Image: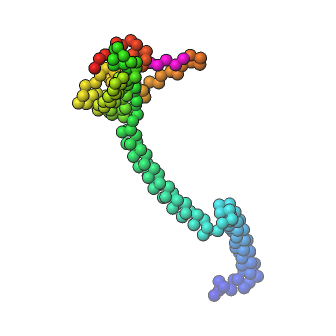
Amino acid sequence: MASLGFFTTPVGLAALSIGGGILFLSGTILFVRLFRKVRELEERQKMFLKGKNGADLESVVLRHDKEIGTLDSEIQELYEIGEKIRSLAAIGIHKVGIVRFNPFQDTGSNQSWSIALLDGANTGIVISSLLSRESGRVYAKPVLRGEPQDFPLTTEERRAIDIAQISRTAKTPSPKKGEPAENEDQENNKEEAPRKL
């Protein structure tokens, strides 16, 4: 009790007042600093939300998460469709070669033809049409990886396959302006002697 009596004396009251003032001053400084921090956080929150409240922000985040999941599944579907298209393209006709010729020495002109229709693996069909004044005949022969299957090929059919095989790898230069376009098949046919069937 004697120690409590000290605070009742004028010196004790002065010490108590000074200690309370120091505590009050440090509490006020701490309060001001905390108030400024809260204001800064509120300003940052306003910048982040830009007029929206927290519930709106949460719904926006959830909606975006759902949309990302939907986009992911759509990308997967597009990938699968792309793979199907790639596999279909591999078996479609990629390469075409055609040769016109005259199979009969004494009559007609280059009215007969052979056409090769090949896929990316050089597999397909070669079709030949032999035309004369009296009749027309059409023949079809399977081709597997650029080689005949079950039936021998004529020279023209082999040339049509060769033209088809290079048709997607090498581009023929287009004629210059003012020059007539040359028909490679007709030039080649002039060099070869027609053959009888």
Q: Residue at x 47, y 22 (%)?
A: 172
Picture coordinates of residue 29, whole percent (x, y)? 72, 68
Picture coordinates of residue 72, whole percent (x, y)? 47, 54
The part of the chain drawn in magenta is 180-184
State the quadrant of the N terminus: bottom right
State the quadrant of the C terminus: top left
Residue 48 vs residue 64: left or right? right
Q: Is residue 49 above or below residue 109?
A: below
Q: Is residue 128 visible?
A: no
Q: Residue at x 52, y 59 (%)?
A: 67
Pick out the residue farthest to the left. Answer: 150
Residue 166 vs residue 23: left or right? left
Decide which of 20, 119 is in the foreground and name it: 119
Q: Image quarter for residue 108?
A: top left
Q: Image quarter for residue 134?
A: top left
Q: Is residue 141 above or below residue 9?
A: above
Picture coordinates of residue 129, whole percent (x, y)? 35, 27
Q: Magenta part mainly helix, strand or loop? A: loop
Decide which of 123, 190 is in the foreground and name it: 190
Picture coordinates of residue 149, whole percent (x, y)? 25, 30
Callout count:
0
Decide whether residue 183 is among the magenta residues: yes
Decide which of 109, 135 is in the foreground and name it: 135
Q: Residue at x 42, y 48 (%)?
A: 81
Q: Is residue 50 visible?
A: yes
